[in-house]
Amino acid sequence: MKIQFIGGARTVTGSCYVLDTGRHQILIDCGMFQGNKELDQWNEQDFPFDPVKIAAVVLTHAHIDHSGLIPKLCKQGFAGSIIATHSTAELCSIMLPDSGHIQEAEAEWYNRKRRRRGRPEIKPLYTEEDARRCLSHFKGIPYDEYTEVVPGITIRMRDAGHILGSAIVEMWVKESEESGTCKLVFSGDLGSKRQAIVKDPAFIDEADYVFIESTYGDRLHGERVDRSEILGGIVRTIQEQGGNIIIPSFSVGRTQEIIYELSELLHKGKIAPLPVFVDNPLAIEATRIFRRNQEVFDEESQQYLRQGVDPLSFPGLQFVESVEESQRLNRVVSGTIIISSSGMCEAGRIKHHLKHHLWRPKSHIVFVGYQAQGTLGRRIVDGAKRVRIFGEDIKVSAQIHNIEGFSAHADQAGLLEWLAGFVRQPKKVFIVHGEEDVSLHFAKIVNETLGLDAHVPYRFETVTYGEAIEVTAHVLAEKEQSELPSGLAHALENVKLASLEVQNILQSQALSSAQKQEVLERLAACVEALEQMAQDCEV
Ligand SMILES: [Zn+2]
């Protein structure tokens, strides 16, 4: 049995692993790389496997960095099932077409420039239509039940508490009738315990090998801030002094959490009723999906439901679908809350609302999510005095708030607590889904505090499981690295990485096995020579 890391290895995004049992190949997640130009280009590269030969995809959750390349996979001949929880399948039915729409819009933006320069047009990665076509492959399953993916591979989805439908995947693999069973556990993205609506991540008893995310592997979320108190305070301020509240928010997950918080504040009488507009078509559809999947909500939400209170609805909550309705909101200058996207203010209707509110001293802009470097949201949070929106120079006079504590990811303590929950310790832990330095740091902590063998795989690295686990890329131990001149150590790492990539190219091309062997041997000799050089250097 082999597993290859295609993405989410020394990067946060692009989660995708290929499991090959010899009998079948399946994918765990098929995510899109996101974040910068170089990562965008990785999405355009050919898959290092044949999509036609993939028997199934097991999907941990609906976020695009886990699901976003599924339409591309289907376009290239994948014909199997995509197995996910019911809620994840439902969320994908709106998020993947939305992603296709974004791909088309981006391609069109580039093509307008290219046409002016007389250059050939580019094609979108996939279209909204491509994404809709792949939805028929989805097969929703419930949490906590055993499902056979293909003969020899059985899974059980456990709640990961990250977003609605998110799952930890327990996977039992039997390579042949005679062989024993190996248990793999993929954490997916693990939620933080502070989240509203979703449950806390489930603990797993045992595994042979664990694949754990490490987004916040180097960070603690800190003291729990009472975000509901802060939000309530801002609402009371506009109710007494006038002005609107503008909340830039991600469509799926965060928007519903804000609705939940407001509903709770109203229910407890901490704020007076007021009009709240959700001005974001995707968030509106997502909220409907949340409402249809109440059976997976956490205990607190269930209690509200038992009392006849819908935690995702309250008098005054209004959903704004059309552009005309959205534009009408510009005339309302006081006493309302507008929740809109995109969460980092880079696109979408939020930009119009910011344009109409940033210059007003009585407006309150409330950030409830991470703002990446270089985004409009980040500039505002960082205290910019003026910003440009739609080519217009706008003075920032509004009051800016940044409410932390809305993270959908476990912090370092949460990740360690989850790992410590294994009653039978895993043989090895693979640290994935994190920036390289964060994953390496977390691996060290896992090793030191839990005594577990932790490894941070490279992209395209293949791991083979047998009697003893064998990692094909024997990367230098960190200690050795630090003793080498950094340039040489880096060069060595690069050669090793390149050799892994060449191995993949060889696997996917029609070369004779003798030819392949020859190329591989040449590469191995090259690495060996470099290693010798490195050792000489040390002396
Ligand atoms: Zn996620």
Image (spheres, grey):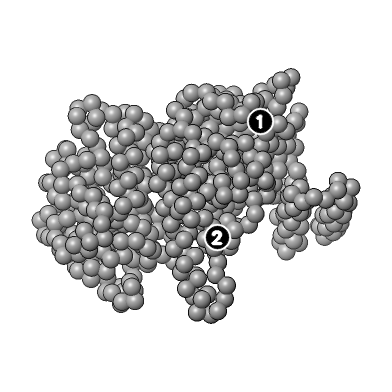
Residue 439 visible in image: no
Q: Is 382 drawn above or below residue 217 in the view shown?
A: below
Q: In the image, which disc is placed on residue 375?
A: none
Image label count:
2
- Picture coordinates of residue 198, whole percent (x, y): 36, 36
Q: Nearer the viewer, residue 227 or 482?
A: 227
Quadrant location of the C terminus? bottom right
Residue 80 visible, this angle = yes
Is residue 25 left or right of 520 when viewed as pictured? left
Marks 1/2: CA distance? 35 Å
Frontmost of labels 1 and 2 is: 2
Residue name at image x 71 percent, y 20 percent: 177
Label 1: how many Cα within 10 Å (few below 14, some 14–19, many 20+): some
Q: Which residue is mark 1?
A: 427
Q: Quadrant of the N terminus?
A: top right
Q: Residue at x 19, y 29 (%)?
A: 308
- 212 sits left or right of 328 in the view: right
Where does residue 230 sit, x and y in percent of width and height? Answer: 24, 49
Q: Position of residue 212 (x, y in %)?
A: 56, 39
Q: Quadrant of residue 243?
A: bottom left
The residue positioned 19% from the left and 68% from the top of the image is 361
Q: What amino acid type is highlighted by mark number 1? A: Lys
Report the disc number at residue 40: 2
Give the mark nearer the N terminus: 1 vs 2: 2
Q: Amino acid at mark 2?
A: Asp
Residue furthest left in the image: 240
Q: Which is nearer the eye, 266 or 37? A: 37
Q: Residue 376: percent from the left, percent from the top?
A: 37, 66
Dividing the picture into quarters, in which one does residue 429 lie?
A: top right
Q: Looking at the picture, does residue 392 appear above or below residue 383?
A: below
Secondary structure under tag 2 reads helix
